[in-house]
Structures are given as structure tokens and as C-alpha cells.
Image (tube, helix red, strand yellow):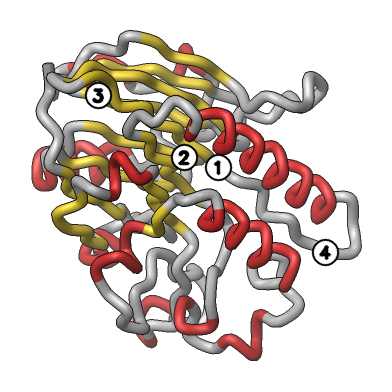
Amino acid sequence: MRIATWNVNSVRQRLEPLLAWLKDCAPDLVCLQEIKCVDEAFPRLEIESLGYNVVTHGQKTFNGVALLSKLPFEETKLGLAGDDEDAHARFIEGVVPLKSGVLRLACLYLPNGNPVGTDKYPYKLRWMSRLLEYSKQRLKTEEPLILAGDFNVIPTPRDVHNPAAWINDALFRPETRESFQSLLGLGLTDALRAVTDASGQYTFWDYQAGAWQKNHGLRIDHLLLSPQASDRLIDVGIDSYVRAWEKPSDHVPVWADLDLEAA
């Protein structure tokens, strides 16, 4: 079973590359971030025609997440618990049936947090604290769980081209990385780092200053696996080739293959 995540940076603007990649990669489950549209404007029919069930949590112009699944959803839930006043569309959860139970997939678009000197950074850290609490509760069920999405976190210096240039950025500040490590400390596994220690494994290249052409990238899109999921991990890939397509997102898809059987 292939599970993928991709920050598409506006699903309507990237529909053609999204459909091409879905045909090419053939993932069973997909988490999309920054769809940047309300639910009614999501290109549901085009994606459903490829055999996917679709659940969206949209927001006009900003944010927005979606789940695509070739399996039926047994359950879906919108929003991350812990702050009833948070109206940002950043989190969606889906449960799909397996022969051996269920798989729970959480699609997230974690706040960027910049500029650090504004209320945006405390909001990011509070959101990460809520995600930590969510993960603690879900891990108690001992079911396969995957947190997938744009975490807006550079975990370690090897995950960015020039670490020194990012020292004071919200994506790389010590508090950000410590919060991410707290997630791993619960028993979640960074899927990519389970299969490779190599540097240069990037998922994002800025549109500015020829970042893509120079390979000045960073890794901020992650799949975190519960023990019951990581035990079934086969392989992980980054489809960086789509960054070279016409009108690309600044992010590229990341996927993981797991030895899980659909019901």
C-alpha cells in the first residue's frame, strides 16, 4: 500500500500536474496540503474519476487539506483538537479498513511560524503541542497511524542546503526542532530516515534565486509512522522530478510503501 503526501500550493492551479502524478505514482492514499479553496471549489470530479474517494477541509485562499483514498473511509474528522477558536483548515483525519483492522491517516499543514517576532511563532508552537497531545492519545490505540503532511519543520542540519542561513527561521529554530523530536520521542518514526541517512533529501525548493536549479532545498514534508505502521515499512521515495514540470508547486510529493492489505 502506497501512502503519499504533497503540498500542492493551490489545487486548482496545479490540477494538471496533480492528475498526471496520481496516474504515474498510483498511490492508494494521498494527503494534500494548501489546496487553497473552499470545499465546493475542490476539483472533486476529476480526482474521483481516477478511482479516489475524496474528503476536504477547505478554506478560501489560504491553507486547506484533503484526503484521497482508493479505499472507503470508515470515519473522517476535520480539525485538530485543543483550540476551539482556531479556524484554520489545517488538519483532517481518515480511517480506512485493512484485513487486519484499520489504518488511521492524519493529514496536516503545520503553521509556518514566520516572522518569529510576531504571534505567528507562538501559534506554531501551540499547534505542535496540540499535535503532540493528539499523537499521544492515538498511539494508545496501538493501530497503524500515519501523520503525513507539510510540517514546516527542518528536523536536522542535513535536511537543509545551508543550515547557517536558517538558524533564526521558524522552521529551524531550536524550539521547533525540539517539538518535532518530542513527536519522535513518543515512538513515531520519520519514515524517510528509517531508510536513508543521506543528506540532500529535499522536498521543497523556493521559487526565488534559482533554488531548484542549484538544489538549494530543504526537507519539511514528512511521514511519521506509529510502531504498528513502521514495522510494515518497505520503502520511501521523494518524487522530486515533478518540481521540473511546468507551473510546479514549490513542494514535491513524498511517499511510503507499507506491507498493509486493504480489506
Quarter of the picture containing the N terminus is top left
Q: Say whether marks 3 and 2 touch (CB < 8 Å).
A: no
Which mark is first along the chain, 2 or 3?
2
Q: Are marks 2 and 1 in contact (CB under 8 Å)?
A: yes
The residue singled out by tag 1 in the image is 109
**Residue 3, percent from left and from top:** 25, 40
> Which residue is disc 2 drawn over?
33
Name the element at disc 3: strand
Q: Is residue 108 left or right of residue 31?
A: right
First in residue order: circle 2 vs circle 1: 2
Q: Between disc 3 and disc 4, whose residue precedes?
A: 3
Comparing labels 3 and 2, the label whose residue is closer to the camera: 3
Q: CA distance from mark 2 to mark 4?
A: 22 Å
Kind of residue sitting beneath label 2: Gln
Q: Residues within 10 Å of mark 1 (few under 14, many from 20)?
A: many
Instruction: Name the kind of residue labelled 3 in the image.
Output: Ser
Report which residue position mark 4 lands on. 116
For the point 63% across and 42% down, the residue is 132
Q: CA distance from mark 3 to mark 2?
A: 15 Å
Query: Alpha carbon of mark 1 to alpha carbon of mark 4: how far?
Result: 18 Å
Instruction: Name the residue beneath numbered marker 3.
Output: 69
Q: Which callout, 3 or 1, points at the residue further toward the start of the chain?
A: 3
Label 1 SS:
strand
**What whole-number distance in Å separates the C-alpha atoms at marks 3 and 1?**
18 Å
* Numbered-mark total: 4
